[in-house]
Amino acid sequence: MRQPLSFLVCLILLLGADGYCQNIDKNYIDSLFSSKENIKNIVEDKDINKLSKMLFRKSVGESIKIYNRLDSLYKDNDYIRINLLDDYASLAHRAGTPMKAKSLQFEGLKLAEQYKVPIFLFKYNQLLSYHYIDRAMPDSALYYVQRAEKTIEDNLQLSKLLHVIYERKAQIEGLLGHFEKRDDYLEKAVASTDTIKNHPNRGFILAKVAYHYKVTKNYKKHADYASRLRKYYFKKNDFKFPEQHTSLSSILSFEETDEHIVELKKILDAPDVTEDSSTHHVIITSLAEALLQKGRYQEIVPLLKKYADENYAFVNTYDRILNLVNLEDAYEYLGDYENAFKVLEYRKLLQDSVRRVETVEKFADFEVKYETERKETQLKVVSIENEKNKQQKRLFSIIAIGGLIACAAIGLLLFKNSKKKTQLEKQKQLLETTLDEKNVLLKEIHHRVKNSFQIVSSLLYLQSENVEDKEAQIAIKEAENRVRSMVLIHQKLYSKDDLVGINTKEYIEDLTKDIIESHQFKKEPISYNLDIEPKVLDIETITPLGLILNELITNVIKHAFTDITETSKMAIEFKQEDDELVLKVSDNGIGMPNEVKESSFGLKLIKALSKKLKAQLDFIPNNDGTTALLRMKRFQAMA
């Protein structure tokens, strides 16, 4: 489930606003930087941070102009540049130029390494990690977040920033599809703020995690963190949020409401949002997803149509793709398949271009990491050699040649053992990543198969509406029901995190309800009773079983009763008896005729599918109608 990016922007606007309103002109900037010198004792500069906050209140275009001027004026002043580059990079990212942002972050990292400044080592490593998360490159993202974490381990005064590490790791696990690990890291981010009194980011993290569990519909966890968030703000006596950005109720409640949609539309007209293209875009994304959830598809098309224009370049490609997916869904729900297909084609072109850029970027990134690690290794080797020489000089008179040989041999064995262990760990991680990618691909396949079946079902429905011959209408309707039984299978597969199979109880209940609702009854629908034993069956078993059940239910509706009344009943029972699966469909109708038409397509289909399941089908007459009894010997149960 996608988490709306607008939450982050809105929350930053809420929790970070501090009311700076001073005019930023040449005199102000010159007075601010006149006393800054190029010194080795580099620290975070409060004046520069204040300027950065002021610039972030302005439009992206205006702020970029000021940063370009500062970049040119102070290109030789390391003190100023190391303080400016992180915010300059963030602004470049907001402006939709991620490669420019990455270049500025690498420049800042080099300065931080040159002067060995812990706070900036942390900042630029975590910013690079976020860059690669945004580019969907988890391996590179993990490399830089681990370097940022190592900086905190070596400098405990930075422990208040540990929550950032956990947030980045949560985002990486989300990219890899490890949703339990993602949630664990988000909760660790909250826990890390508990250990520090009056942590400045506690409210932000609590709100973020509460909103995360709202989006993923984890009712228990959402209630827990929403409760903590309420207590936090009541305790601070700071239960006020600017109406023009969002409301706390939208974070604490579960479902998107009409009031929340009205709220988001107001946000789009707020001056600080309309002037900032990046913020404006993510608010639009959040509004589109809320409208999707409420089924208000007509309102989505004019909101997102501009993202399908190849000349529209105000946001980065990844964010455009996200909104193209929403636009594609809206067209599909509205039945406008021509425009849905056009959007799909354009989205695929964008995705292909992104993949080509990512490949080139990855090669360049590997080269940078190789050079960094090579320099670090050289420094370590020099340090080890110097220490070894000192020890040899001090202990040469008492260390025997045999002892040196023994130590060397033991060290070699340990090194080989450590190298092999590292290699095995890498192979294990590669296998886990491959498996996760396979699962993601399978879910995508099931999603596409479901969409294809849905289109076929819709076409059959449209065809049946235009056919006047009653027999032809009935035949098309039956074909539509058969397709719907397969749509339901793939829908249930792609909507779950695991792909092991389908739960029979959920599937049979939904399929029966679907078939009953799809038929037109003269008075009222037939009453039915279900007694289904929950089992998880693989797709090879559940597909023919669903088609057989569809035929049996349809047969009862069409032939079991002269006229369906309130006394008409149908019962479906499914359970396992020893090594067989047993399906019973019973009715209290007029009973089976003496002769059954063997040429019936439905009966031929049942017999063909029964062979696949190695099943025996019998129709048993009883005092109150007929029972269809299917015993299956060939099946694959997961639980």
Image (cartoon, grey):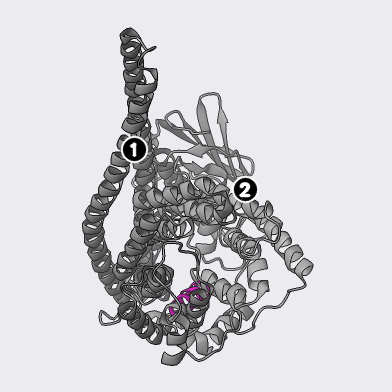
Relative to 467, is 391 above or below? above
Q: Is residue 482 above or below residue 353?
A: above
- Between 124 and 244, the residue placed more toward the observer is 124
Q: Nearer the viewer, residue 448 or 595?
A: 448
Which tag, 2 or 1, sits closer to the chain's start? 1
| Left or right side of 436 for 220 | right
Does residue 578 appear in the picture of this structure? yes
Q: Is residue 455 magenta?
A: no
Q: Foreground: 44 or 54?
A: 44
- In the picture, measured across the screen, residue 620 lies left or right of residue 304, that is right
Q: CA–CA distance between discs 2 and 1? A: 85 Å
Q: Could you say where residue 106 lies in the image, as x and y percent from the top left?
A: 33, 61
Label 1 secondary element? helix
Q: Residue 322: x, y in percent?
A: 39, 68
Q: Amino acid at mark 1?
A: Lys
Q: Residue shown at 41%/91% (left/top)? A: 26
The amino acid type found where label 2 is placed reads Asn
The magenta span reads 281-292
Residue 550, compared with residue 108, is above or below; it is: above
Residue 339 placement (x, y as % from top left):
31, 77
Residue denoted by label 1: 380
Q: Can you give x and y, in whole percent of width and height, for residue 617 in the image?
A: 46, 35
Residue 588 numbered tag: 2
Main secondary structure of the magenta stretch:
helix
Q: Nearer the viewer, mark 2 or mark 1?
A: 1
Q: Residue at point 50% right, 63% down?
A: 3
Q: Are marks 2 and 1 in contact (CB under 8 Å)?
A: no
